[in-house]
Image (cartoon, rainbow, N blue to C red):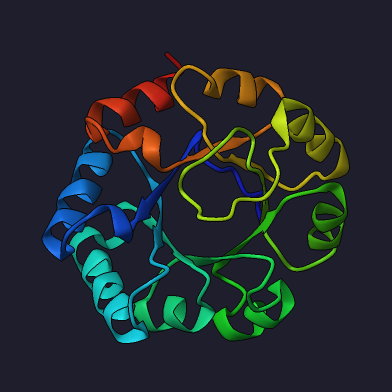
Amino acid sequence: MAALVLPRLYAILDARCFPDLNAILAFARELADGGVTLLQYRNKTASPKEILSHARELRRVFGPEISLIMNDRADLCLAAGFDGVHLGQDDLSPDAARIVVGRERLIGVSTHNADQLRAAGQTWADYLAIGPVFGTTSKANPDPVVGLDGVRAARALTRKPLVAIGGITLETFRSVLDAGADSVAVISGLLQQPREAAKRFLAGD
């Protein structure tokens, strides 16, 4: 299997930022028009039924145009026909998720320190995420900030593709890539003018 190459921008669509499905789809379309090819759907509050309904509509609308990643739920990833699942430290283990989603779908894992990253690196995870790099408002109880030094340390500990997440903006993302991240995951930094923001992240401006 060829080595996984992640796009520079790993866009995250957090459902709590939008009033309804139409707004979610409109935002996703703006991202796609801006060049986004990898999008995680994150919904921490809705019922599994609603999450699956939204996910299937995203899959229907975008087809193979965008690789879609389900946050947390390997079962809903499979049911929605998504391309992968992203797991937190309290979710199903990567190896257990591999049994659910099969060998062809991507599995990513969030880590917040060196010990977690080392452990995740020994699993079937395809890519690892490290963060929060900077202060973030996307989580109610975020883990301690790791900073650019944390990204550098993570890079030294794994050869797997590395995604940096947490408070990354157009002003800071270049420094994060320079610290060793292959990709930057962004939520808040895409909410205003998502098409233009995506273009700037991808262009490296």
Q: Would you say 35 lies left or right of 158 here?
A: left
The spot of residue 61 in percent (x, y) is 18, 62
- Write down the quadrant of residue 30 in the picture: top left
On the question of residue 10 being in view, the answer is: yes
The spot of residue 186 in percent (x, y) is 45, 39
Outermost residue on the left side: it is: 22
- Write down the quadrant of residue 195 in the picture: top left
Q: Would you say 187 lies left or right of 6 here?
A: left
Residue at image point 87% right, 43% down: 157
Q: Would you say 142 lies left or right of 37 here?
A: right
Outermost residue on the front side: it is: 141
On the question of residue 180 being in view, the answer is: no
Residue at image point 70% right, 44% down: 144
> Which of the pair 102/14 is nearer the observer?
14
The spot of residue 102 in percent (x, y) is 59, 79
The spot of residue 19 in percent (x, y) is 17, 59
Residue at image point 46% right, 26% down: 169
Residue at image point 54% right, 69% down: 105
